[in-house]
Amino acid sequence: MQNRRQFLIHSSAFAAAFAATRLPLLQAAAQGAPQGAPAAATPPRKLRVLVLGGTGFIGPFLVKQAVARGHDVTTFNRGKSDPNAFADLPVRKLIGDRATGDLKALEGEEFDAVVDLWPSYPKYVREALEVLADHCDQYLFISTISVYQPMSQPLADETFPVMTLAEHLDPEKVQLTGGTYGALKALCEQRAEASMPGQVTILRPGLIVGPEDDSDRFTYWPVRVAAGGEVLAPGTPDDPVQVVDVRDLAAFTIHCLEQSKVGVMNVTGPQGGMPIGRMLEACKEAAGSDAKFTWVPDDFLDAQQIAAWSDLPTWMSPRRDYGGIGAVSIQRALDAGFVQRPIVETARDTLQWYRDTQKGRALRAGMAREKETAALAAFAAAKQAGKGTEKAGGKRP
């Protein structure tokens, strides 16, 4: 059974389907608090926090921040992905396997709050809450903005319709694919609220990025821009994109527990999206690069078989029917205290992590340099011949 992160990294079906369809900040400076963020408030009380999962991308940041805030943290997982995780922290570890229904270690435990990072199937939420619902005050589920139906308009909020499974599909048995992922996550949310009405927090992050993100769905840009030269940039500099630094997501998660914030909140940003030109300039500043950006229209990208989101990570054309995904509303999260660090800081830290730890490995997302070079040459030739100069949007499909 793949977890959320493994699925997003390894499933090309997800990328294809996505492209086709659609606080105070609480971390101490040593843990990477955003520059200029408000001083962290004192926790109202020491919480007993259970993290279901905890060894993947989001989990370690979440656990470390909870410990730094003075909370008692317990993790529950198989103890296999990273058995030495948190060896230097006062973290209690419980061992079990949700994929096989082994939740015995949770029986008889009492917690103030539970953070669930793992499920893509509603049965796993149901099974966990059959054990925990009467033994915790708050359940927080890390979901995804992929629950939404394909959106073309900007500033869609948490009331926007979510994906649903076809009636003939059994949510207990259906295969996890790009076409079912969002609907299954929505069912997980609904299962949680049905089990603990009024006590559930649903966070719907967008693209989660930053140091340790080896999916490379954002990492591609600071690494590519750092290499310098002519860089193929998609659409127009004003096209909106949204990301959330994993450290900011972790900090906001702990904030929601400390302040007992419940309900559904989109957690990405900034509000309404940032121009991708600004994001790429931030990557250039972070790297001290001489990169020059060549903005290539949608129709030309289509002709070159260059795909949004996979070949060009973070970007979906706002001129296509699914283009609103880069400009969702995060007003609820902002009102609840969500704060984001400057994108240049995320780009700088991501680039430094890649250089220090990844030993120059090939990127898992984005274009190969050969493909980019060929596309740029073709675009230059088309412009020289008086073609390829249409407006960025071109014709709608």
Image (cartoon, helix red, strand yellow):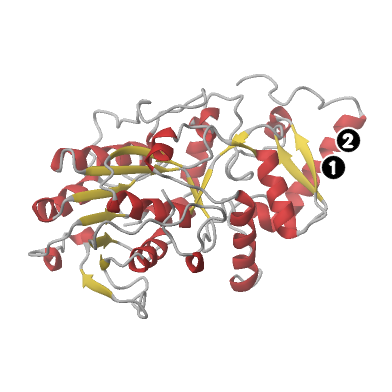
Q: Mark 2 belongs to which amino acid?
A: Ala
Q: Residue furthest right?
A: 384
Q: Residue furthest top?
A: 395
Front-most of residues 44 and 316: 44
Specify few, some or many for label 1: CA neighbours under 10 Å numbering under 14, 14-19, or 20 or more: few
**Mark-to-mark CA distance, 1 and 2:** 6 Å
Q: Which mark is residue 322?
A: none
Quick check: 137 left or right of 5? left
Specify few, some or many for label 2: CA neighbours under 10 Å numbering under 14, 14-19, or 20 or more: few
Residue 340: x and y in percent read: 51, 48
Looking at the image, residue 100 lies above or below residue 206: below
Residue 373: x and y in percent read: 80, 48
Callout 2 secondary element: helix
The quadrant of the image that shows the N terminus is bottom left
Q: Residue at x 61, y 49 (%)?
A: 343
Quick check: 8 left or right of 291? left
Quick check: 213 left or right of 369? left
Residue 182: x and y in percent read: 37, 38
Looking at the image, residue 184 lies above or below residue 134: above
Q: Residue at x 31, y 67 (%)?
A: 70
Identify the residue position indicated by label 2 in the image: 381
Identify the residue position indicated by label 1 in the image: 377
Q: Identify the image quadrant of residue 77.
A: bottom left
Q: Mark 1 belongs to which amino acid?
A: Ala
Q: Residue at x 29, y 53 (%)?
A: 258
Residue 389: x and y in percent read: 82, 25
Q: Is residue 350 visible?
A: yes
Q: Identify the image quadrant of residue 44.
A: bottom left
Callout 1 secondary element: helix
Q: Are marks 1 and 2 in contact (CB under 8 Å)?
A: yes
